[in-house]
Amino acid sequence: KKCAFIKRGCLTLLKNEVEFCYECDEFPCEKLENLDAGYQERYFVKLIDNLRRIEEVGVEKWIQEQETLYTCPECSGEICVHDSECFDCGNKINPNII
């Protein structure tokens, strides 16, 4: 929705013709596929699947799911998607690896 990296190269988003990439006829576009591949490789996060899930359940439900997913089981702190570490206790965990 607000990804500056994708938005700056996408006229559809820049013109506010869609709110989310999944609303676009080009979904998933090459730029999004490339970003998705990088996130899968580095962080085990599937951006395209996340967008499909948002379409399926809505933003509020998806946010609730993400809050649950990224809550540290040790201290209930928040886990960083980029370094797989809890901001509060330092627990190293990647909730995207099952």
Image (cartoon, rainbow, N blue to C red):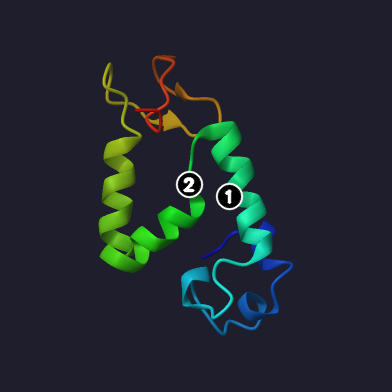
Q: Is residue 12 above or below residue 75?
A: below
Task: Give the amino acid type for the residue marked by disc 2 in the picture.
Answer: Lys
Residue 93's quadrant in the figure? top left
Q: Quadrant of residue 51?
A: bottom left
Q: Are the residues tagged 1 and 2 within 8 Å (C-beta)?
A: yes
Circle on res. 46 = 2
Label 1: which residue? Answer: 36
Residues packed near mark 1 inside 10 Å, few (<14), some (14 to 19) or many (20 plus): many
Foreground pick, 60 / 94 = 94
N-terminal label among 1 and 2: 1
Q: Residue at x 39, y 62 (%)?
A: 52
Front in this rendered view, residue 74 or 37: 37
Q: Residues within 10 Å of mark 2 (few under 14, many from 20)?
A: some
At which x and y percent is residue 24? 53, 78
Residue 64 screen position, x and y as percent: 26, 49
Q: Which residue lies at the image location 25% right of the left edge and 57% below the top edge?
A: 61
Seen in the picture, residue 61 relative to 73 is either above or below; the reply is below
What residue lies at 48% left-to-right and 41% top-to-bottom? 45
> What secondary structure is marked by label 2?
loop
Q: What is the three-letter code of the residue carrying label 1?
A: Asp
- Residue that lies at the very extreme toward the right in this rendered image: 9
Rendered view: 23 above or below 4: below
Q: Measure the alpha-carbon separation of dots 1 and 2.
A: 6 Å
Rendering quarter of residue 66: top left
